[in-house]
Image: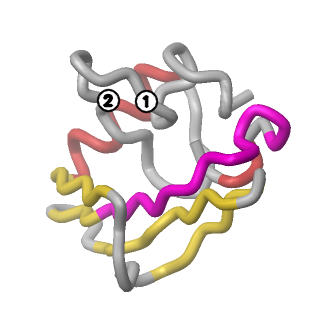
């Protein structure tokens, strides 16, 4: 889900900031900005995140192992099954 996996053509017109608050064995806050067909990763909190994902590191790592992907953070956010969105490549084509 990190910048290298973004499909720029499909992401045109989509703008969002995802903040990740990871706790436990790995504590960190970072955010991913998607705008103008590009994604950029930043350490630290976002000024105005569109969504904040809070999870223990152990859950984050388990998701990464399940999905077989690692793009800079220890995993991928858990999508809300009731709201398909850009965080899950199986539900939205903005990720390659």
Q: Residue at x 48, y 22 (%)?
A: 67
Indicate the position of residue 83 as horizontal and vertical percent values: 29, 24
Is 94 placed left or right of 62 in the picture? right
The stretch drawn in magenta includes residue 10: yes
Colour setting? secondary structure
* Image vertical order of residue 93 relative to residue 46, above or below: above
Given the current orientation, which residue lies at the most extreme right position?
A: 9
Distance in Å between CA atoms under marks 1 and 2: 7 Å
Give the SS element for disc 1: loop
Is 60 displayed left or right of 31 in the figure?
Answer: left
The residue wearing badge 2 is 79
Residue 93 part of the magenta segment: no
- The residue at the point 60 percent across, 68 percent down is 41
- Residue 1, given in percent of the width and then of the height, sits at 57, 42
Question: Label 1: how many residues lie within 10 Å, few (<14), some (14-19) or many (20+)?
Answer: some
Q: Nearer the viewer, residue 22 or 51?
A: 51
Residue sitting at 41 percent across and 58 percent down? Answer: 18
Q: Are marks 1 and 2 in contact (CB under 8 Å)?
A: yes
Q: Nearer the viewer, residue 6 or 27?
A: 6
The answer to which quarter of the image holds residue 70 is top right
Magenta-highlighted residues: 8-20
Give the mark, 1 or 2, whose residue is nearer the N terminus. Answer: 2
Q: Which residue is mark 1?
A: 85
Residue 69: x and y in percent read 58, 32
The quadrant in which the C terminus is found is top right
Above or below, comparing residue 81 to residue 8 in the picture: above
């Amino acid at each position: 889900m990190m910048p290298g996996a973004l499909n720029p053509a499909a992401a045109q017109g989509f703008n969002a900031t995802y903040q990740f608050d990871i706790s436990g064995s790995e504590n960190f806050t970072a955010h991913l900005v998607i705008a103008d067909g590009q994604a950029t990763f930043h350490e630290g909190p976002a000024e105005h995140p569109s969504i904040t994902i809070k999870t223990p590191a152990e859950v984050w790592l388990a998701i990464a192992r399940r999905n077989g992907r690692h793009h800079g953070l220890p995993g991928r956010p858990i999508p809300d099954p009731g709201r398909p969105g850009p965080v899950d490549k199986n539900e939205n084509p903005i990720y390659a």
